[in-house]
C-alpha cells in the first residue's frame, strides 16, 4: 500500500512539473506511472481478505484491516483522478485557451493537493510513531486551502467565459479538469479519517 501511495504522489508531482514546465512528455509519464494502479490495489485487497479468512483478527487489528480495505479504494480514486487530470491538461495545454492568468492559482491548488498526499505518505511510512491528530489537522488545513483556491478558479474562469464566449465550452472543461485536483484533496481527507479510525476507533466520516 505504501508503494501504491508513493506512485500516486509521484504521479501528481510529475503532472504539476509538466504543467509548470509546459512539458507534454511529463504529462504522459505521469499517466504511465499509474497504468497498473487498479491491479496493485486488487492485490492488496486480496491479501487483506485472506488475512480475514485465515486469522480471524479482532479488536484493533480488525479495525486496521477494515480501514486499509477502504483505503485502497480511496487511493485508486485519487490515482484515477490524477490520470484524468494529466490527460486533460495535456489537451488543454494545446488548445486555444490561455491559462496564463490562472497559472498562479492552478499551481497553488495543485500544491495543496500534493501537500495533503505528502503528509499522508509520511505518516504511512512511520505509522507506529505518527502523531495521528497532528497529521489529521495538517491534511484538513490543506483541504481547506484547496477549497479556497478552487473557489477562486471558479470565479476567474466564469469571468473569462463572459469575456471569451467562443471558448466557453473549453473553459468549462478546464474547470471540470481542475475539479479532479479538488476531489483528490477531499479523498486525502478520507484517507486521514481512515487512519484516525485505525488508530483511535470511533466513526468514519467521509467526504461524498
Image (cartoon, helix red, strand yellow):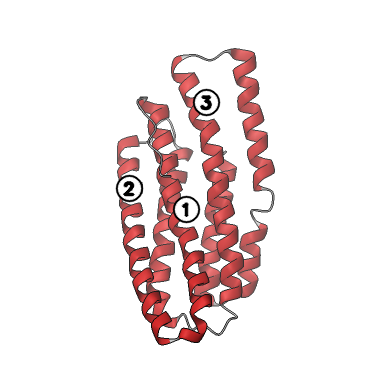
Mark found first going from the N terminus, 2 or 1: 2
**In the displayed structure image, the side of residue 168 where residue 203 appears, left or right:** left
Q: Residues within 10 Å of mark 1 (few under 14, many from 20)?
A: many
Disc 1/disc 3 C-alpha distance (Å): 23 Å
Q: Residue at x 60, y 59 (%)?
A: 83
Side of 14 where 129 appears, left or right: left
Number of marks in picture: 3
Q: Give the percent coordinates (x, y) of residue 60.
A: 44, 19
Q: Residues within 10 Å of mark 2 (few under 14, many from 20)?
A: some
| SS label for mark 3 | helix
Quadrant in which the N terminus is drawn = top right
Q: Are marks 3 and 2 in contact (CB under 8 Å)?
A: no
**Whether residue 30 is situated above or below residue 97 in the rendered picture:** above
Which of the numbered marks, if any, corresponds to residue 193? none
Q: Residues within 10 Å of mark 3 (few under 14, many from 20)?
A: some
Assign the C terminus to one quadrant of the image.
top left
What x and y, as percent, mark residue 26? 61, 69
Image vertical order of residue 148 relative to residue 194, above or below:
below
Q: Which residue is label 2 attached to?
A: 140
Among the two numbered marks 3 and 2 on one chain, the one whose residue lies closer to the N terminus: 3
Q: Position of residue 58 (x, y in %)?
A: 49, 14
Front residue of 86/134: it is 86
Residue found 31% across the figure and 54% down from its top = 144
Task: Determine which quarter of the picture holds residue 81.
Answer: bottom right
Is residue 100 visible in this depiction of the protein? yes
Residue 184, label in figure: 1
Q: Which mark is residue 65?
A: 3
14 left or right, relative to 59: right
Q: Residue at x 33, y 47 (%)?
A: 140
Amino acid at each position: 500500500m505504501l508503494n501504491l501511495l508513493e506512485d500516486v504522489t509521484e504521479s501528481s508531482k510529475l503532472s504539476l512539473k509538466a504543467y509548470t514546465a509546459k512539458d507534454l512528455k511529463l504529462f504522459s509519464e505521469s499517466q504511465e506511472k499509474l497504468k497498473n494502479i487498479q491491479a496493485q490495489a486488487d492485490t492488496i485487497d486480496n491479501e487483506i481478505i485472506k488475512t480475514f479468512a485465515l486469522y480471524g483478527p479482532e479488536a484493533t487489528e480488525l479495525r486496521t484491516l477494515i480501514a486499509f480495505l477502504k483505503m485502497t479504494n480511496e487511493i485508486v480514486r485519487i490515482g484515477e483522478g490524477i490520470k484524468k487530470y494529466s490527460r486533460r491538461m495535456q489537451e488543454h495545454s494545446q488548445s486555444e485557451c490561455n491559462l496564463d492568468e490562472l497559472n498562479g492559482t492552478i499551481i497553488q491548488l495543485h500544491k495543496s493537493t500534493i501537500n495533503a498526499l505528502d503528509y499522508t505518505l509520511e505518516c504511512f511510512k512511520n505509522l507506529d510513531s505518527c502523531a495521528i491528530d497532528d497529521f489529521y489537522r495538517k491534511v484538513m488545513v490543506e483541504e481547506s486551502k484547496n477549497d479556497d483556491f478552487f473557489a477562486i478558479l471558479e470565479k476567474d474562469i466564469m469571468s473569462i467565459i463572459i469575456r471569451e464566449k467562443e471558448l466557453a465550452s473549453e473553459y468549462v472543461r478546464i474547470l471540470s479538469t481542475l475539479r479532479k485536483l479538488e476531489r483528490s484533496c477531499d479523498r486525502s481527507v478520507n484517507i486521514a479519517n481512515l487512519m484516525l479510525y485505525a488508530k483511535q476507533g470511533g466513526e468514519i466520516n467521509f467526504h461524498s
